[in-house]
Image (cartoon, grey):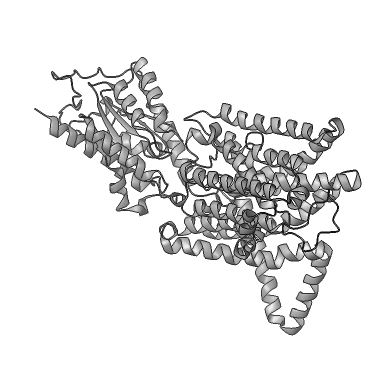
Amino acid sequence: MSTETTSIAEAPPARQAHEAPTRVRGLDGLRAVAVVSVVTYHVHASWLPGGFLGVDLFFVISGYLITSLLTAERARTGRFRLGAFWIRRARRLLPAMWAVLTLAACTATLAGGDTYAGLRGNVVAALTYSSNWWQIAQHDAYFTGVGGKPVLQHLWSLAVEEQFYVLWPLLLWCLMAVLRRRRDQAAVTLALAAASFTAMALMYTPDTDTSRVYYGTDTHGGGLLLGAAAALVLPLARATALRGRTHLRALDALGGGGLLALVVAAWLLDGTGAAVYQGGLALSCVAAVAVTVAAAGPGRFARVLSARPLVWVGRRSYGIYLWHWPIIACLTGVAPGFAASAAGRVTMLGLTAVFAVTSYRVLEEPLIRLGVRGYLTQARRWFVARAEARPRQALAMAVAGAGVVTVACIGVSHAPTSTGLEAQIAAGERAAAAAAPHTSAAPAAADMTGGRRAAVAKTAPGAHDAPGVPGDEITAIGDSVMLASTDALEQAMPGIDVVAKVGRQMDAAPDVLRQLAAQGKLRRVVVIGLGTNGDFSDATIADVLRITGPSRTVAFINTYVPRSWESTVNSALRRAVRTHPGTVLVDWHDAIAKQPQRLWTDNTHPRPSGTGVYADAIRSALESAAGSTAP
């Protein structure tokens, strides 16, 4: 997250034109907008489906501020003091992050189970600021990942920023050495930003893991570079010094228009759709540049963002961002039902505020004010005085601190590498691959009216077969929820062909169906369980039904997922079944809503005890369809 101090100095007349002010209140207020949107999205994505764009607003602010500071230093001294720059960054970023890593690792270890799975790799990645590449290697998709919430997942964005802090000053030095004119430097930087956004758009492929596209520094660095380009055109010192009615009106128009665009994007976009990757995020970053420049200026827009509550939150935004996600992840892992309630969400916000304020008062602000040596000296004096006045209290504090560190180290060294759900899905993938058929049953004949006829044969029930629904006549196409239930499906309907994939969306169903039909593997009954990872259009459903044809029965499984698109998906499926004869609705949502304890902590995927509920819901729906169409 952007962490440069940004409150404007009270008396800047002596400042040279090239010098950046040390503080800009409007940018602190803008940080508050960014962190509130991110926290809102993480606490309850349905409240603000595109709240994750707050991270990109942070990126733009960081690129703008860092470049303004670097160019101001070069104008003042004739060179970049990179060593001093990197030391300042480390002093600002590391202490609070180390505190978060220690307490998060300790809490996750005590919580046990899936909460601390993968902790070792995540901690090492966080310490080396490579969390984004680690999560790419783990295929830990930000929007469609399976299982519980990794307690350090949010550090991917800090890794991207830190990599920018290391590489960008070197690249900027090269640009300034080769290109004298500032507008030429800005043009090259804009070209790099465009290349990053283009790479994101080209590398995005529906129905594939998006972790590489979303987490990659090369594909998600466009916002940082756009902010840098803006600073080369209108650096912070010039923006704060703008005067004149025309300039101020232009700033206010930029800020108002940009903020409106960001609000619309945060309301309409969600991370599972192609729009985010194919231009949506890029346009949002352009809007973020507009509001950043406007917030840096002296206009009305900046004054609104300079309101005390916004500035207060903005100055603590780094701590808020650091602490909020481990709190959400640990609370969800320990008490998923409570975490999903209104009281649970209020608890998350309250704990975030407490830890962020404490972190700011105890670590962040004193380190900025005193420096590392001064801070350590003051801390030592405080503890010695405390030990002399209240020795038992001091001893208890020392023991507690040592205990937290010890538990954290034990957790990091002994944490399992995968969650129970990941193991369950992997077993489902193996089972589905082992049972993959080589041929299919012939499609049922169409009825005389040319309509869709239920293709469920009436046969005597077997030990596991549902009456009238032979498993060897069913093709099931789904996502990770279906994969997690593969064993139960094969027990309930022996011979069923499960064609499922983690992260799959309904938009991919037409291509999967065409491929199966071309291979002669598309059976008479098609079960489709897609919708966990995003919504879809009525046109996609129409395409699915056109491919399956009137001679097959298609059963759609609705979804149970605590995301903004759940109601949209389920409404679309109800509408499809109501308007297309011969289709069937499998009501997984209502079946599992009555027994949420059978779900993993993500409140989406069934535990082993819940997979039978999933399979029974499908079997019952197909039995009902067979009974209603029997002669």
Residue at image coords 85%, 48%? 73
Q: Nearer the viewer, residue 6 or 597?
A: 6
**Percent position of residue 583, x then y:** 23, 31
Residue at the limit of the structure toward the bottom, as seen here: 389
Residue 378 appears left or right of 211: right
Residue sitting at x 81%, y 59%: 12
Query: Which residue ends up furthest to the right in the rendered image?
Result: 78
Q: Which quadrant of the figure contains the C terminus? A: top left
The residue positioned farthest toward the left in the image shown: 631
Looking at the image, which is closer to me, 292 or 394?
Answer: 292
Residue 205 can be seen in this image: yes
Left or right of residue 128, residue 474 in this image: left
Q: Point out residue 201 in the picture as x, y percentages from the top left corner.
A: 57, 29
Image-based side of 453 in relation to 497, left or right = left
Would you place residue 380 above or below residue 175 in this image?
Answer: below
Using the image, determine if residue 623 lies above or below residue 165.
Answer: above
In the figure, residue 375 lies in which quadrant? bottom right
Picture residue at 69% right of the left edge, 59% below the top: 25
The residue lying at 60 percent from left, 46 percent from top is: 253
Looking at the picture, how far across and down is residue 502, in whole percent? 46, 35
- Residue 191's place in the image compared with 56, above or below, is above
- Residue 476, position in %: x, y? 33, 30
Work out whether residue 156 can be spotted: no
Q: How many marks?
A: 0
